[in-house]
Image (cartoon, rainbow, N blue to C red):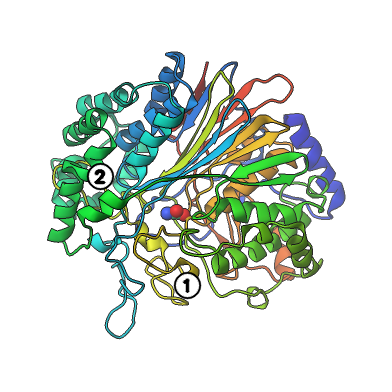
Amino acid sequence: MLKRLLAGTAALLVAVTVPVWGIASQAAGTSPTHDLDYDGTAPITRAELAAVRPVTARHAMVVTAQHLATEVGLNILKQGGNAVDAAVAIGYALAVVQPCCGNIGGGGFMMIHLAGGKNVFLDFREKAPLKATPTLYQDSKGNVVPGLSTKTFLSVGVPGTVMGLNAALRRYGTMPLTRVMAPAIELARDGYVLEKGDVTILDARAQDFAKHPHAAAIFLSHGQPYAAGQRLRQPQLAATLERIAHGGTAVFYRGSIARAIVAASRAHGGILSMRDFADYSVAWGAPVTCGYHGYTVVSDPPPSSGGTTICEILQILAPYPLAKWGFGSVEALHYTIEAERRAFADRNSDLGDPAFVHDPVAQLISPQHATALRAGIRADAATPSSQIKGHLSPTEGRHTTHYSVVDAHGNAVAVTYTINFWFGSGYIAGGTGFFLNNEMNDFTSKPGVPNAAGLVQGTANQIEPGKRPLSSMAPTIVLRGKRVFMLLGTPGSATIISTVLEGFLDVADFGMNVQQAVDAPRFHEQWYPDEVFVEPGLLAPAVQQRLEAMGYRFEQQRLWGADEAILVDPKTHLLEGANDRRRPAGLAAGY
Ligand code: GLY
């Protein structure tokens, strides 16, 4: 693999006249302000990237953003559980050991590849409360009220995680709920020792915990932020998980947990009702699929934009010789950025919850549409975003979590789930012990007007009772023939799409191994703002100069999501797992 990377690098040195990628001295970039994030990850040098290797295993592999959750999943597999059993156990475990993002108070998507060849998609995205209206976050003059869709109880969508995990287990798992939930309950009850990677994330929101007594009681230690080495115990969450393990989905949606959330919502000006919980449902469906250079990409359909947008970009890129141009080259960056710009314009204009709007997925990922879009890309210049049709723009954020599992039978599961921002709305209802999402912020607060998170969206994604907000999450499985080749996925809101896309291209076209692909510096173009976000270390100075001369504006970003990926070597069938260097608490492990 490394040879392929280096061969690709050599080829691009021939193909372009300027040196490409790879210098750490470029690290000093401007970092966008974000009230919830830490300082980002140090850039990786070219030499460091050349040296990284994935974890390998013969039978099964688990990769998550928190090492204890990885161990939970691996143990389930070793005990004879399948990938779905492990995925459900991990989903509950991450709710304990990665409380920023792992959750039972949010929602997400599960992509399943069954050993027999079937691909299945499970949508457990949150829904808007029945009392929600398109103008929920506007004042009487029609102005969007800052913070209403992120920091209040009005930001909370009806959570889907518990019903989603339990539905997956019931349909495709082999173990009882009590068994797959037991490790999570133990971790919550007995606690676990925090590592630096865990504390960094808790620290990012310690000041907010202080404002919420229920959160402060759990996530502050005598009123102070936790330090690495301390044990975090969550007895209330343990009790909640116990209730779910024994009472099942009904406890959450019709019983004491729903009642606690509704009571807290009422007490804090929210609009959640018992009916919202009783009416909540998850949806099974078919994934979005597309071909690219002999691979089949299987990803999520609306209400996520992830799979559709990735497939649209890949269809635009397919005829371009990216492999010849090489990673980080002027040409590869130029055409990928232009493809992203055009696909994001479509994404932002056209997509929403399919239960409420018609999503033109087939049209957006069709070869005809790709041909038409390619015709507008100039070889020598960036296209100003104002010249691309559409009227919207997505948001930023790195607060979700993704995990990947492959079992010894050939089943593969990719899950991305979220409470939106780190620690969601910041609210914990009564003694439930878990954070509630602020997923309502993913809706359009007002068409054409940026919401508190900088999101500008249209009517396809306007708030309606019982509707799911448009997501960018993209749990993705790549097949080669009928066999699993890669599993990818990451946090990062709109940057999820670029991260998954580029992780795949880094392997498929640039010959990287899966750890290199996960660790390689990234870029992201989302139509508006009309600038390209780049991770420090991506752009060689001469490449940057040439691209700027073509009209590109770059914004350095140190904060990116964590791609937790698995690759199955097509020749040896060896499993290769890659935990993202950007989440040092994470772990890839197999047997
Ligand atoms: N909450 C982030 C997303 O779903 O895209």
377 left or right of 390 in image = right
Residue at 38 percent across and 71 percent down: it is: 445
- Front residue (pair 221, 244): 244
Between the C-alphas of marks 1 and 2, the distance is: 29 Å
- Front residue (pair 312, 211): 312
- Label 2 element class: helix
Q: Which residue is mark 1?
A: 459
* Disc 2 packing (10 Å; few <14; some 14–19; many ≥20): many
Q: At which x and y percent is residue 427?
A: 22, 52
* Dot in front, 1 or 2: 2
Q: At which x and y percent is residue 448?
A: 47, 77
Q: Residue furthest top?
A: 79
Eyeballing the image, is 78 above or below 435? Answer: above
The three-letter amino acid code for the residue at tag 2 is Tyr
Q: Which residue is mark 2?
A: 253
Q: Are marks 1 and 2 in contact (CB under 8 Å)?
A: no
Q: Is residue 372 visible?
A: yes
The three-letter amino acid code for the residue at tag 1 is Thr
Which one is earlier in the sequence, the residue at label 1 or at label 2?
Answer: 2
Q: At which x and y percent is residue 52?
A: 61, 30
